[in-house]
Amino acid sequence: MTDNSELRELCTQYMQVCVVICYGTFLQTYGQRMLQAVGDTVLSMISLISGAVVNIILDPIMIFGLLGCPRMGIKGAAIATVIGQCVGAVVALVLNKLKNPIVHVRFKGYRFKTSDVAAIYKVGIPTIITQAISSVMTFAVNAVLMSVSETAVAFFGVYYKLQNFLMMPMNGLGQAAIPIVGFNFGAGNKERIKQAWKGILPAGIIMALIGTAIFFAFPRQLLGLFAASDEMLRIGVPALRIISLTFVFATLTIIFGYFASGLGNGIINMIGSAIRQLIVLVPLVWLLTNFLEISYTWYAMWVSEIAAFIYSYISIRRELKKKAGF
């Protein structure tokens, strides 16, 4: 992606830590999903937030050498990330041990069964693809932005961190929908599915509007948390304001996808994610960046988010009518 020797060295330092010492993220995801599977979305959320908060707190301390910590730069950011992942893993596993009333993991008597693995992958493959889409999108957009400047790439990385933190409660709402919808769909309780629909959607919209207001009103302050240069502020301040207007559409697409998963259809979530993060977004980013300029690039998110919302809304309404009767 780059011939810049300094950037290659920085990326190498970061990846040598984050990619090699990434055990925490797998254990955290495992523990968090176990809590979610039994319907305890509060503890699932706590396990997610604990790692993210630790990462956010440690980032400036380890990057800039605050509070007696040596200044480690990019390697400090990587170390902060893996520490956050490990903290999240410990919290998730401890909460499962103490608070999970249904699923108790023991190795005694365990027998490997190919049929069990096949059943897991049948449900999990759409989610695997959905997760992979995000990584492919990041790689592709970074490759396009590299033709503009390294600052543009750095800004996109900062934005993605901010967006992930913002979308955490929205993802939490969506993940809460899966067990609620799934349990009641299996029990044939359509009224409870309807109640969940009417409760989760307004909550997600309110959170998205709050996020939009914050990003639109305080873009300079948000970027300042990452010691943004003047060049990054020039690119990033208008970009955050443009992007913030898509948060409601993104939130609804996410929640629609999780609802569909609860009804046993993971394809809607996968395709919705593909539209908003890859199929529409990446080609538009390339076109706008190469034929106009960087200030127009971010409007690609308007088109991709609205397209994903339209697809997801039509699909979930059809699914709800067929399986839940409303």
Image: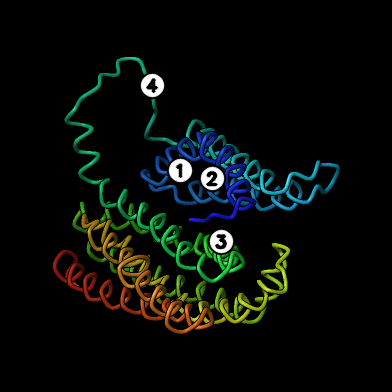
Please name the residue that numbered disc 1 is placed on. Answer: 32
Check if mark 1's residue and mark 2's residue have beta carbons within 8 Å. yes
Q: Which amino acid does label 2 sit on?
A: Ser
Check if mark 4's residue and mark 3's residue have beta carbons within 8 Å. no
Query: Which of disc 3 and disc 4 is earlier in sequence?
Result: 4
Expressed as whole percent of the image width and height from the top left, the position of residue 62 reads 74, 46
For marks 3 and 2, give the CA distance: 24 Å
What's the residue at 60%, 63% (across, down)?
A: 154
Q: Residue 157 carries which label?
A: 3
Asked whether 188 or 284 is in front, the reply is 284
Q: What residue type is labelled 1?
A: Gln
Q: Nearer the viewer's eye, disc 1 or disc 3? A: 3
Check if mark 1's residue and mark 4's residue have beta carbons within 8 Å. no
Please name the residue that numbered disc 4 is placed on. Answer: 106
For marks 4 and 3, give the CA distance: 40 Å
Expressed as whole percent of the image width and height from the top left, the position of residue 216 reads 60, 81
What's the residue at 26%, 52% (across, down)?
A: 126
Please name the residue that numbered disc 2 is placed on. Answer: 47
Question: The residue tagged with tag 2: helix, strand or loop?
Answer: helix
Q: What residue type is labelled 4?
A: Arg
